[in-house]
Amino acid sequence: MMDSLLQTWHDLRDFVFPGHIPGAEVTRSHSWPWGPAIVVVVFVAAAAWVTFIYARERTAASRTLRVTLAALRIALLGLVLFLLYGWMLHRHRTDLPDLVLLIDDSASMATVDDDRDPQQQARLARRLQSAGLRQPSRIALAKLLLIERDAGLLRQLQQRYRVKAYRLGRTLRPLVDASETGAENPEGLGGESPRGSPNGLRDAIRRLDADQPSSKLGAGVQDALAIQRGRPTAAMVILSDGVTTDGKTIGEAAVEARRRVVPLFTIGLGNSRPPRDVQVADLLVDDVVFVGDLVHFDFQVVATGFAGQRAIARLSVGGQAGPAVAGPTASGPAVAERALTLGQDGVSQNVRLSHRMTEQGDFECAVEVEPITGEANTQNNRLTCTVKVRDDTLRVLYVQAYPSYDFRYLKTLLGRSLKRDSSSKAVELTSVLQEADLDYAESDETAARTFPASREELFAYDVLIFGDVNPAFLNTTALENIAAFVAQRGGGLVVLAGPRYTPLAYRGTPLSALLPIDVETAALPPSGATLDRGFVPQPTRLGIASPSLQLADTLAASLAVWREMPPWYWSLAAADLRPGGRALAADPSRVGTGGEHLPMISMQFVGAGKVIFHASDETYRWAHHPDGETYYARYWIQTLRYLSRAKLLEGGRLAELTTDRNEYRRGEAVRLRARFLDDRLAPAADDGVTLILESDGNPRRQLVLHRDAVNRGVFDGTAADLPDGKYRAWIAAPSVGGPSPSQRFAVVSPPGEQARLEMDAADLQAAANTSQGRFYTWPTAGRLLADLPPGRQVRIESLAPTPIWNSPVWAAVFVALIAAEWLLRKRAGLV
């Protein structure tokens, strides 16, 4: 009897809650053609009729008794209807829905992230120790989540699902073979674990190592979806840092998962911020300079994870190699340093360190940023280069109509300038004074009687200083030779404005076309005006970066010197610059019609050469600086050397093409720089350099480079969206003579597991959203079990149906109800 009652209870339970038992499914059927609604209507009508009869019955019975008798009669009617309806229970054996577990075992999962506070690290260490794990790597966190507390999570998953576990790296591989666990595997699928026994899977997870050389995560997800084709799959759980090094990402594969109605539950492991690092890149420096030049080392610093922190950038110069030593020596002590405040992640900072080269020779120089505690890679903190320092003599021609103060001071300065530690002259000066006596040329060894008559004579000079010159002494051929000297020969030209002739007397001549100012709109001060109000020219933002205007070794010190320079009083008002003109210094007290300060020193690239224009002939006043002639001499020597820089490159290589790196990851922009070491070869147009990019299997591409704002011979550009391959870039235009400069670089994929170590949280989140799953981080992964869908069970076998209506228990209940009603009526005297 007890067994019958227990079976009836189970039958009732299955009748009310069909399919609640894992691995089983229960359905119901009945023998009447009517639906349950008809039965309910009949029952309600009968119950109402019984209630009405008992309510109208006039007996001595109490109200409680009448209600009890009515309830018994209604129960009898309900039982009869239930039995007549003929309920049958049908049981079926079912298989649990599949749950696919993917664990990333690529090499990036071996990363130990250091983004936790000490208390969190201590708690994590205790948890790892209790689970028998050591380092808090990403793969260890995945293991800890699954196997801690006696594999509690695995046990609960295996009670609800048929768990299929795979390793996900370069390929998709079963984590547990059926032969290891004894699990049935009729479909031949690897990675299944036996129901209710997670030990085999737990042991396999414990042995898991992060050693795969690449991460094809998207391809692995697609392979897992293909294996599950036709199988009832509740969800796919992915434990990974999301870093894909080759092929599709998980987010891209999630589209296929949504089409197959398989939600992805992604658990992101690791730090989503890139590893902390400081990188020095893109070093730009003049290869060949003069002794005494202030050499600028311009480079970029890119920091990650150190925003707002302080760092020290240093420049070191090794011992000079000398003519008898083959090659430069190793870099030596630091000669300049600068404190930096590191910027936001991935944002490059332009840094300039400067050093005045005081000795002749070849020097190995290095720029570096001092390593910071916590850097992931300190090998990229340093770049080296070789700087050749020469002490060549400059040939300068100075032309002036009359002996002005500027002429006398500058002639004296250049005539006595000597090379460092030498008695030989640094400048070989030739002067032409148009209004001088005939005996002047014989009494002054630097003087010449006339301006060079032929182009060859003029081309023998490196720099021409053109003062206030009377055009009556120069014919058209001489002016054309000057234009050719600049544009073709690549010579330097300094033009000084004067009160008599230059530059207004040269309107419409070949000389006016060389000037960076518009001569047509220039004007002299009003005749008879009292010039008692002085002004101190100040460098512009572009000018302070120009080599000629840097009077001190640092930018701040140079600006301080300029503020203390003696003032000028007379100047030409030339407010309008030509399209290619650049203002280097301006009068801070006066502005032109355009609202900009009047330029006092300006420059322009003309053909292969450079032209600098002074709107005044009062530079001699700088010799009255409290420090003597130091800054006056420095300005002029630096200006002459800047204009004659091409002289140092004669007979050597003339141009180069470089990239900031030799290897790029697919999708990264490639920065290319063409540098004409001989400015004479640089094109006149600011977009005059065209590159050709060649790669096997990819079409040719053209890239136009644009001129740098300060350096005439430097052109920059970037190439984006280049497919994988090895590339050769070469200068197609202009021609530089001889072999065209070229550079090789590669665009690769994968870049290696260590190239990107930050967790790709964005892709994991996108994958979860696209597939209608969930994304978790390590602190929130505990919600996984509650969020997983139940899945759909699959029928394996149908069992014999169980009739409910003819159970002897129901007969006993029927007799009990009748007997109870009769006894109550008998006791109340109603029978």
Image: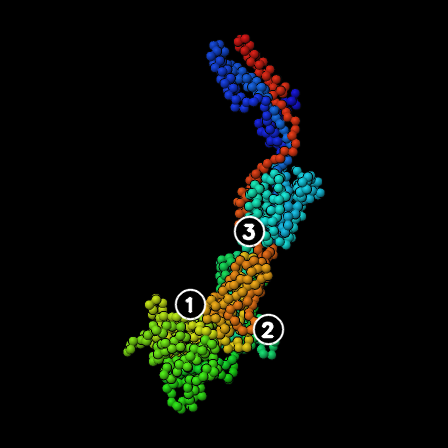
Amino acid type for the residue under numbered disc 1: Arg
Q: Which residue is mark 2?
A: 329
Amino acid type for the residue under numbered disc 2: Thr
Mark 2 vs mark 1, foreground winner is 1
The front one of 287 and 196 is 287
How far from the left and from the top, in percent, is residue 119?
56, 49
The image's colour scheme reads rainbow
Q: Is residue 715 above or below residue 645?
A: above
User: Looking at the figure, which quarter contains the N terminus?
Assistant: top right
Q: Tell me if 755 is positioned left or right of 612 in this view.
A: right
Q: Earlier in the sequence, mark 3 or mark 1?
A: 1
Q: Which residue is mark 1?
A: 541
Q: Which residue is mark 3?
A: 760
Q: CA distance from mark 2 to mark 3?
A: 44 Å
Q: Is residue 561 above or below residue 745?
A: below
| Residue for point 52% across, 83% down | 422
User: Looking at the figure, which quarter contains the C terminus?
Assistant: top right
Q: Tell me if 815 is positioned left or right of 345 in this view.
A: right
Residue 277: image quadrant is bottom right
Mark on residue 9?
A: none
In the rendered structure, are the residues bearing label 2 and label 1 in contact, judged by CB atoms less than 8 Å apart? no
Give the class, few, some or many, for how many residues have Cα within 10 Å of label 1's Cα (few <14, many ≥20): few
Q: Is residue 172 above or below residue 279?
A: above
How far from the left and from the top, in percent, is residue 821?
55, 13
| Residue for point 40% across, 72% down | 516
- What element does badge 3 sit on? loop
Q: CA distance from mark 3 to mark 1?
A: 41 Å
How far from the left and from the top, in percent, is residue 92?
64, 30
The front one of 529 and 140 is 529
